[in-house]
Amino acid sequence: MRTGTADTAGAVGTASAVGTAGAAGTAGAAGTAGAVGAAGSAGRSAPLRVDAQRNLEHVLRAAREVFGELGYGAPMEDVARRARVGVGTVYRRFPSKDVLVRRIAEEETSRLTDQARTALGQEDEPWSALSRFLRTSVASGAGRLLPPQVLRVGADAEDEVVGRGAQDEARVPQQRQAGRPELRVVGQRLSAEELDDPGAVELLEVVGQLVERARAAGELRGDVTVADVLLVIATPAPALPDAAHQAAASARLLDILLEGLRSRPV
């Protein structure tokens, strides 16, 4: 009886050991497989992140081109086609067109502000500073991507600095098209609440400094406002099929507009 019991205990012990070893082996194998799988998954996800970043850059570049050529009314399909991605890819990064427009407008407004600050800080002559800003902004194309609310800024008729009559108000094209234009006072400091865009307010302030300096030096016409300067940088030359002719036409148009802004001896 004792021998049978010992045999039974031995068998149970052996089975238990085998089971334990098997379980450990299985767990080890599973752990190893999991680690390998995780490593493989991590290796595969890295290129996807690179692709996503590349697609984002393509979409943003295409959006700048399309909106610069056709305005912010251009459909998202045109942006996707120019970026050579599916429209679903565009919407995955930008849930609505408003989000994409806001992204482009904010970036271009910031670029214009930097260009204005550079001209203000590096040019001693007031007219040179203003003309440098205009030439730089037109060359970069950022002026054509100004936020619509900035282009709706107008000149108040009773602005003491400008000193024009009650009916002499400068309006940009969008205001002429609108039935009831909303005018803002250029001579006063605009608040972020009025424009709902702190970046746009900063741009108006810096460009306002360029305008005031040139006017105080007697080199800018007394009736020229910040709105007029924004209109200049937002006005593209007619599209031409040849790139060299396009560049020449843009430069010529800007020369004419600059001459129109300068004051003339009485």
Image: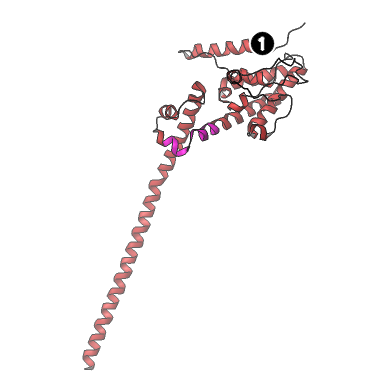
Residue 215: percent from left, percent from top: 75, 17
Amino acid type shown at disc 1: Gly
Res. 54 visible in picture: no
**Residue range (magenta):** 89-103
Q: Which of 220 and 12 is in front in this view?
A: 220
Q: Position of residue 262 (x, y in %)?
A: 70, 12
Residue placed at 68% from the left, 13% from the top?
261
Answer with the quarter of the image where residue 120 lies: top right
Q: Nearer the viewer, residue 185 or 209?
A: 185
The verdict on residue 95 being magenta is yes
Crowd tier of the residue under label 1, counting other residues whose Cα lies within 10 Å: few below 14, some 14–19, many 20 or above: few
Q: Check the image and name the residue furthest to the top.
A: 266
Quadrant the N terminus occupies: bottom left
The image shows residue 113 at horizontal and vertical percentages of: 64, 28
- Seen at 61% across and 31% down, the residue is 110
Magenta: main secondary structure equals: helix
Instruction: Report which quarter residue 241 is drawn in.
Output: top left
Residue shown at the point (29%, 70%) measured from the top left: 22
Q: Name the secondary structure under disc 1.
A: helix
Q: Name the residue under label 1.
A: 260
Q: Relative to 52, is 231 on the left or the right?
A: right
Could one spot residue 2 in this view of the protein?
yes
- Nearer-the-camera pick, 69 or 191: 191
